Image (cartoon, helix red, strand yellow):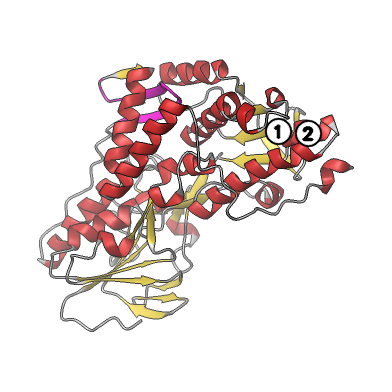
Amino acid sequence: MNIPKSSYPRVVIVGGGFGGISLAKKLGHKEVQVVLLDKHNYHTFQPLLYQVSTGGLEPDSIAYPIRKVLQDYPNFFFRLAEVTHVDAAQKSVQTNIGTLSYDYLVLATGSETNFFGNTEIERHGMAMKTIPESLNLRSLILENFEQALLTDDLHERDALMNFVIVGGGPTGVELAGALAEIKKGILPKDYPDLDTRRAQINLIQSGDRILNAMSPKASQKAEDFLEKLGVHVWKDTRVTGYDGKVATTKTDLTFETATLVWAAGVRGALIKGVDGDALIVGGRLRVNEFNQLVEWPSIFAVGDVACAASDAHPRGHPMMAQPAIQQGKQLGDNLVRLLEGEPMKPFKYWDKGSMATVGRNKAVVDLPKFKFQGVFAWFVWMFVHLFFLIGFRNRMVVFVNWVYNYVRFDREARLIIRPFEKDYSAFKE
């Protein structure tokens, strides 16, 4: 990998997400050699992926080069690589570009879509965890309407304009709201020769309420917002299969659709070598209060891939940006303490609240002491997301896009740059 030898201890970070970037920045000017490995050369602001999928933003406005984020740190090295195996005994990682030794290893690999073993849904459904996946979904949505123009079969046309979103968490709710706004304000102008009123957006939740990690009031208000936008919200409904044409459920309810988006769960993105049964709890790596793997004291994990179970968080911390950012910063301080022979400090999560937007002037916000919904919540949601975007340019681009979309009620990134190949022949049978 051509990483120069150094008298400084080497900290290898796997993953350039919120946790990995926060840790690298914290160690940037310390007497350690930091090597960050990621299979992409950019950091993705995942909370806004749904806006890429629905044409509200271009992908470069929510991505930022990792090298540029950390270019001012003297002992930092980045390599574009995919880590395939960790050899804890030899203290090395194996990648597609070679092997690298470490003094301390930090796994910040984030999470991946969890299909819970349903290979049929995994094969035919759409995920939305990465920029390429979001671009695929954007292309498919637009291609479906282009295809709907070409068919005289009303049944097939309805299936092409029927969208099923599985999972009533923030991702599912925000995507459903965005699609509903597209149906209302954009499709009639783009497709005047198509009866877009027949388009349906279905949000399916296996539990008894959407946004179940937020307060009951926020959950109910979000559902009210969605229903006013014309979204069909199905609760206590579990999707069991999807063959590319029909989504089936446990209650025998079926949905004919050309687009099923799976937003029903995530799991830690594990790496071979640290994926034994004793290490995994709920699909995540078991760590102690210092984000340290007990079996191997020189290996740490932060963010979505880490599960630090406690009385306050028996299933680990929420798989969101804030725990990852806070864990990354705390671990940076702890590694310095460790190198200086001082005891590490246990991680304490500061819950700053949660929020979700449903659409134009519609959002719900749960803060530790305040809970509010509506227009003000929507402005708070926008401010928070702009603040945490990396890079002044990205903040300005996103802000200008949001202002333009608000004033014109439009989403101009409706581009099929990279067509997504889907077999439509099943709808003609």
Depicted 86 relative to depicted 417: above or below: below
**Amino acid type, mark 1:** Met
Residue hosting label 1: 161
The picture places residue 119, in percent across and down from the top left corner, at 69, 52
Q: Nearer the viewer, residue 197 or 345?
A: 197
Residue 132 showing in the rendered view: yes
Q: Nearer the viewer, residue 174 or 409?
A: 409
Instruction: Place residue 67 in its image quadrant.
Output: bottom left
From the viewer's perspective, tell me whether residue 366 is left or right of residue 113: left
Q: Position of residue 165 (x, y in %)?
A: 61, 35
Q: Residue at x 23, y 65 (%)?
A: 71
Tell me which residue sits at (36%, 54%) in the image: 17
In the depicted structure, whether residue 305 falls above or below residue 160: below
Residue 337: x and y, percent?
13, 60
> In the image, which residues are magenta?
353-369
Residue 315 is left or right of residue 367, and the answer is right
Q: Which residue is mark 2?
A: 157
Q: Is residue 184 above or below residue 345?
A: above
x then y, percent, for residue 97: 44, 79
Of the residues shown, which amino acid type is indicated by label 2? Arg
Q: Check if residue 398 falls in the magenta segment.
A: no
Q: Distance between the Cα atoms at labels 1 and 2?
A: 6 Å
